[in-house]
Structures are given as structure tokens and as C-alpha cells.
Amino acid sequence: MAQATQRATTEPNLIRTSRLKMENPETFDGKPTTPFNNWWKTVTKYLSFYPESCDQQKIVWVGTLLTGTAKAWDLHRYDTMGENDTWTNYSAAIRTEYFDSREAAGAQLKLSQLKYSGDIRAYMTEFRALNNLARATGESLQ
């Protein structure tokens, strides 16, 4: 008992908590038909949950989420930049490569075709999701 008391007084006050774990975002294949913008938001939200990650960890982890032509892009970038890449440069490059400005136009079209079908929550959820991409305001939103 004396040892336990002594240990408790010499160790800092530790709060024992479980580390939360999140599931990885879906993969991204780089195809023009695969939406990039929401995928990228999910990736950045995930990374904000793990702020202690260094640049190389973030870059490698994002690479594990890529498939198809996006994986080929990532591997080419690694062959070119190697360990000298930074998260700031990598994230700017992947956004430049895959950002789809047509996503907003497609969302605007879907928003204009959206119909209420008896479930206000489902309608509002779909409305908000589409408008988040379309960024419609004023007359275009009406």
C-alpha cells in the first residue's frame, strides 16, 4: 500500500481515457465521375481529429486512400518529390489536380430538380447537401 501511495504522489495526475478511433474515409479513384470535393472535406476533417500527425504521415495516409489514376498520380508525385514533399504543397497539388468546378453546376441542377416527397427531414438534408456544393444564394436558390 505504501508503494501505491508513493507512486501516486510521484506520478503526474493522469487521466485515463480511451482513444477514439474513426473509420477511414472512402477511397478516391480519380475518375471524373467520382466527386472529389466532399471526399476531400472528409479527409481534412479526419486529419483535424489527429492534429499530431506530421506532414509525411498525412501524405502517406492519403496515398493509402487513393486507387486507380489517383494512386498513379500519388506515386508519380512521390517519385518526383520523395521525402521533400510537405503537406501544404501536397494538399494544394491534389486539390488542383482533382477539384471539379462542374460539381457545383451539377449540384445546382439537382437542386433545381429536387422535389418534396412527404419527408421534410430527408428533403432538407438533401437540400443542404446539394446547396453546400452549389453555393446557391438569392434568385438562383429560389
Image: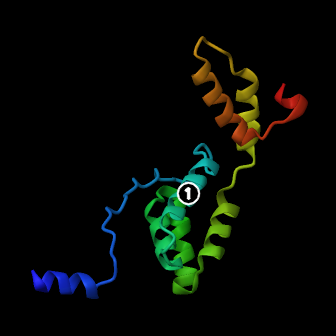
Q: Image check: 113 left or right of 139? A: left
The residue under the point 57% across, 86% down is: 84
**Vertical placement of 68 versus 9: above or below?**
above
- Amino acid at the residue labelled 1: Lys
State which quadrant residue 17 falls in. Answer: bottom left
Q: Quadrant of residue 11?
A: bottom left
- Image color mode: rainbow
| Above or below: residue 128 compared with residue 47 | above
- Side of 102 relative to 72 (left or right): right
Residue 95 in the image: state x and y as whole percent: 67, 61
Query: In the image, residue 57 lies at what x, y percent?
Result: 46, 75
- Decide if residue 81 is on the left or right side of residue 27: right
Which residue: 69% across, 21% down?
A: 114
Residue at the left extreme of this rendering: 1
Residue in front for this viewpoint, 129 or 15: 15
Q: Position of residue 108 (x, y in %)?
A: 76, 33
Q: Which residue is mark 1?
A: 45
Quadrant of the snapshot with the C terminus: top right
Q: Nearer the viewer, residue 34 or 48?
A: 48
Indicate the position of residue 41 as horizontal and vertical percent values: 60, 53
Name the residue at the top extreme. Answer: 118
- Could you tell me which quadrant the N terminus lies in? bottom left
- Binning the other alpha carbons within 10 Å of mark 1 as few (below 14), some (14 to 19) or many (20 upward) gives few
Residue at screen point 66% across, 15% down: 116
